[in-house]
């Protein structure tokens, strides 16, 4: 744990919860101030030498949440420093690429004063590391400084033939250079990769001699990814070259830090105590096509370090196996692809995320950022190799998510937030950040100011799934640049009163839930090997690529939906985390999580280390449930027999059987009950400072009368009003449309 996180935890542990009246809050006009607020407003001040009253301090903060728990809004400049406090906004996301590189050398001198002024306001500052997104591009300056740093992909071209005789392949137009080539026998059983013979590559031409029978000549070449990837999609908006660096290359990432991070730190006079840290915006491997269908090449990630890293990690030579990266449904091909994407993920984790984290922590700040296509497990592969492994390397887990309109309230998959909250459990992090993105999932540029009920719905679901910190770029003022063809931007904006109320709502929930521990006894295994093994590069637009894997993702979504609708809380656990877990008292202990049930979705290849933990968990009295199928193969062929024997008695079940098999997913000590059930209410349970906390949200757009069952004293905290009151269970509650309550035992 970094000193930064240790200090935050010590601060959180000082906060105690008690029933104290709230005061001084802003609320919608239809909500009268609670009587308790008036009493608090006239309460006498303690003597100057009296010890601080933690209960009173908490009540004051619940009424008027600290900036550190309110929304962080994009942009830090003269205008926002004046405007954001009026709207109740707590913090700033500073984008300083213009000051650094577009407004002349004198503009850099503004950066330090901007950060200092936010510090005077007591407002947290996050520093965006992008000059045009996705992060890493730095306005194209990394590649401008050294063209060898530009991201590349590996593609292939082949030629089929019969019998002996010459075979030739010329370097395709648009390719950079050949990497290798080999001749393989082709039989009715498929390409005989193990018998491939390397052939010469000279002067942009592959030359070979055929063999008796059928054969295929395969050549592999690099492609500079300087067109039709996401990096070029923002060139006009941000006035950059679109030339993106290779995030697998540590020297390229070091250059990125020198161009973006270092000058901001210098102009600030050091960042420790002034900024929370640096925030990345969708950095990724840049191997998906962004615009074109039928693009020239289908690519996988590539640089010179990959073959050696592959050999070191997996114990065999990648180069003869290259055809398997692009084709083949057989077990060995799926295994090679899995090993390849594991290699890429490890390089990305170390050279990009790890290097940035180390740079930040050496300067007393944190690293964070949200990522691309985190809602699609299949696309975790081309974007990151292994998203959870990569994202877990950052200090503060983060994501972005859309704000759906009402017609998608019941179908929107907020469960993707589990990836981030599960990383927090694995890596013992207190804060989980989400960007509420007004563009995606709602109406694009034509609905940039979602109405407050839509914001409430999203915020509630995200708190339910473990998020406790919010950022956004919601337009505060009306905007309408729409032309007669419906193009342009449209925003209605918000009144200061409404937006301040929303900030206080999420601030109160964050005050209570940030740093709390989930009460959760169920883990769901992250089946990344299935997606790694079955993913094959494509020359299609990324949306068409994803459609090819929708059926593959369906079991994962079904498990999510089944557990959530049955009031079963769960965490997503990475294979590495399971392999490294300890078994205590019949539970799988991962980070700060403790799980008595491990749910195993469909997967292809099971690491033998995970098998041994499964066996140990079951021997200790824990439960392992296989959904739909049981794997019969290991991550490595040498372990296949161990997997088959170890799982010989395992029997799969349908996802619908999970609730009955799991039962209650929380400790019996969480003995409050809530009616009506999950169709109308979402209930998430937490521990904090020896107290039990229930977050209860109304999923519907009408009032719901809630009957709380149980017995004993209960503290009821209303994030809509700031009111705190004491009650005794059983008790009735009235929760407004798309609102929530916090109960503490």
Image (spheres, rainbow, N blue to C red):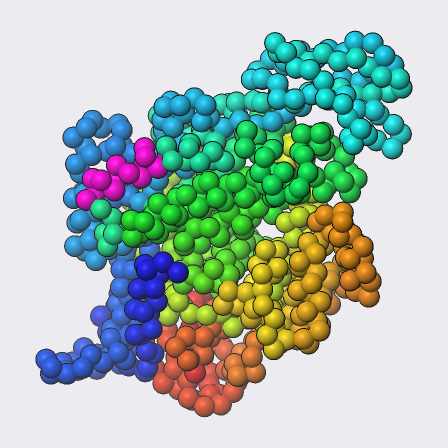
Residue ID at (45%, 63%): 428
Q: Is residue 148 visible?
A: yes
Going by the image, does 230 lie left or right of 556?
A: left
Which residues, given as a range, are shown in magenta?
Answer: 256-269
Q: In which quarter of the image is residue 69?
A: bottom left
Instruction: Indicate yes or no whether the magenta region holds residue 258.
Output: yes
Residue ID at (13%, 80%): 45
Q: Which of 105 and 21 is in front in this view?
A: 105
Q: Is residue 279 visible?
A: no
Instruction: Indicate yes or no whether the magenta region holds residue 280.
Output: no
Q: Which of 587 and 230 is in front in this view?
A: 587
Which residue extends farthest left?
Answer: 48
The image position of residue 311, as x and y in percent, is 63, 38
Instruction: State whether residue 550 is above or below residue 303.
Output: below
The image position of residue 222, as x and y in percent, is 58, 22
Secondary structure that dominates the magenta span: helix
The image position of residue 619, as x and y in percent, is 71, 73
Q: Quadrant of residue 491?
A: top left
Going by the image, does 652 lie left or right of 734?
A: right
Residue ID at (43%, 58%): 432
Residue ID at (40%, 63%): 430
Going by the image, does 177 lie left or right of 509?
A: right
Q: In which quarter of the image is residue 47?
A: bottom left
The image position of residue 427, as x and y in percent, is 47, 60
Instruction: State whether residue 26 is above or below residue 670.
Output: above
Q: Nearer the viewer, residue 298 or 410?
A: 298
């Amino acid at each position: 744990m970094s000193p930064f996180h240790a200090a935050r935890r010590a601060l959180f542990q000082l906060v105690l919860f008690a029933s104290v009246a709230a005061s001084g809050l802003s609320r919608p006009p239809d909500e009268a101030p609670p009587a308790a607020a008036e009493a608090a407003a006239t309460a006498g001040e303690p003597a100057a030498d009296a010890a601080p009253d933690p209960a009173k301090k908490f009540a004051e903060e619940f009424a008027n949440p600290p900036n550190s728990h309110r929304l962080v809004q994009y942009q830090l400049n003269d205008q926002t420093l004046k405007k954001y406090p009026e709207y109740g906004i707590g913090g700033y996301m500073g984008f300083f690429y213009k000051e650094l590189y577009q407004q002349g050398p004198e503009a850099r001198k503004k950066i330090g004063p901007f950060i200092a002024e936010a510090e005077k306001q007591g407002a947290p500052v996050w520093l965006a590391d992008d000059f045009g997104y996705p992060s890493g591009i730095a306005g194209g300056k990394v590649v401008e400084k050294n063209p060898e740093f530009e991201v590349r992909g590996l593609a292939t071209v082949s030629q089929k033939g019969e019998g002996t005789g010459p075979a030739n392949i010329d370097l395709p137009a648009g390719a950079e250079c050949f990497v290798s080539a080999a001749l393989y026998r082709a039989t009715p059983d498929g390409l005989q990769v193990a018998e491939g013979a390397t052939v010469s590559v000279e002067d942009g031409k592959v030359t070979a001699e055929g063999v008796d029978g059928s054969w295929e000549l395969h050549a592999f070449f690099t492609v500079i990814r300087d067109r039709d990837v996401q990096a070029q999609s923002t060139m006009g908006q941000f006035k950059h070259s679109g030339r993106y660096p290779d995030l697998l290359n540590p020297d390229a990432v070091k250059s990125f830090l020198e161009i973006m991070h270092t000058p901001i730190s210098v102009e600030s006079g050091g960042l420790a105590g002034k900024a929370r840290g640096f925030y990345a915006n969708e950095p990724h491997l840049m191997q998906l096509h962004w615009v074109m269908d039928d693009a020239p090449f289908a690519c996988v990630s590539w640089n010179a370090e990959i073959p050696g890293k592959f050999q070191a990690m997996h114990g065999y030579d990648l180069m003869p196996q290259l055809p398997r990266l692009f084709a083949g449904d057989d077990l060995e091909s799926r295994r090679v692809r899995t090993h390849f994407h594991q290699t890429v993920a490890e390089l990305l984790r170390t050279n990009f995320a790890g290097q940035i984290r180390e740079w930040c922590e050496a300067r007393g700040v944190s690293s964070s950022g949200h990522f691309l296509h985190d809602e699609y497990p299949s696309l975790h592969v081309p974007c990151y190799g292994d998203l959870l492994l990569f994202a877990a390397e950052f200090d503060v887990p983060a994501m972005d998510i859309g704000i759906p309109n009402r017609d998608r309230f019941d179908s929107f998959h907020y469960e993707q937030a589990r990836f981030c909250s599960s990383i927090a459990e694995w890596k013992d992090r207190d804060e989980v950040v989400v960007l509420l993105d007004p563009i995606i999932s709602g109406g694009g540029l034509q609905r940039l100011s979602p109405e407050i009920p839509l914001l409430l719905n999203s915020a509630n679901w995200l708190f339910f799934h473990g998020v406790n910190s919010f950022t956004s770029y919601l337009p505060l003022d009306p905007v309408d640049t729409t032309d007669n063809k419906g193009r342009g931007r449209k925003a209605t904006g918000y009144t200061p009163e409404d937006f301040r109320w929303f900030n206080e709502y999420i601030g109160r929930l964050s005050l209570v839930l940030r740093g709390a521990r989930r009460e959760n006894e169920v883990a769901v295994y992250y089946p990344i090997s299935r997606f790694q093994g079955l993913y094959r590069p494509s020359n299609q637009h990324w949306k068409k690529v994803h459609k090819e894997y929708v059926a593959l993702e369906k079991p994962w979504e079904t498990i999510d939906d089944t557990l959530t609708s049955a009031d079963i809380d769960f965490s997503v656990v990475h294979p590495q985390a399971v392999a490294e877990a300890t078994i205590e008292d019949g539970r799988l202990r991962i980070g700060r999580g403790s799980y008595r049930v491990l749910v195993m979705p469909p997967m292809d290849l099971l690491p033998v280390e995970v098998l041994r933990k499964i066996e140990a968990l079951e021997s200790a009295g824990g439960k392992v449930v296989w959904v739909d199928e049981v794997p019969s193969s290991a991550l490595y062929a040498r372990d296949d027999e161990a997997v088959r024997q170890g799982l010989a008695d395992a029997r799969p079940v349908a996802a619908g059987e999970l609730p009955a098999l799991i039962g209650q997913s929380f400790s019996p000590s969480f003995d409050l009950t809530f009616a009506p059930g999950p169709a109308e209410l979402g209930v998430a349970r937490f521990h904090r400072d020896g107290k039990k906390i229930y977050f209860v949200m109304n999923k519907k757009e009408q009032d719901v009368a809630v009957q709380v069952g149980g017995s004993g004293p209960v503290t009821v905290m209303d994030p809509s009003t700031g009111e705190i009151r004491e009650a005794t269970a059983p008790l009735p509650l009235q929760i407004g449309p798309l609102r929530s309550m916090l109960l503490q035992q």
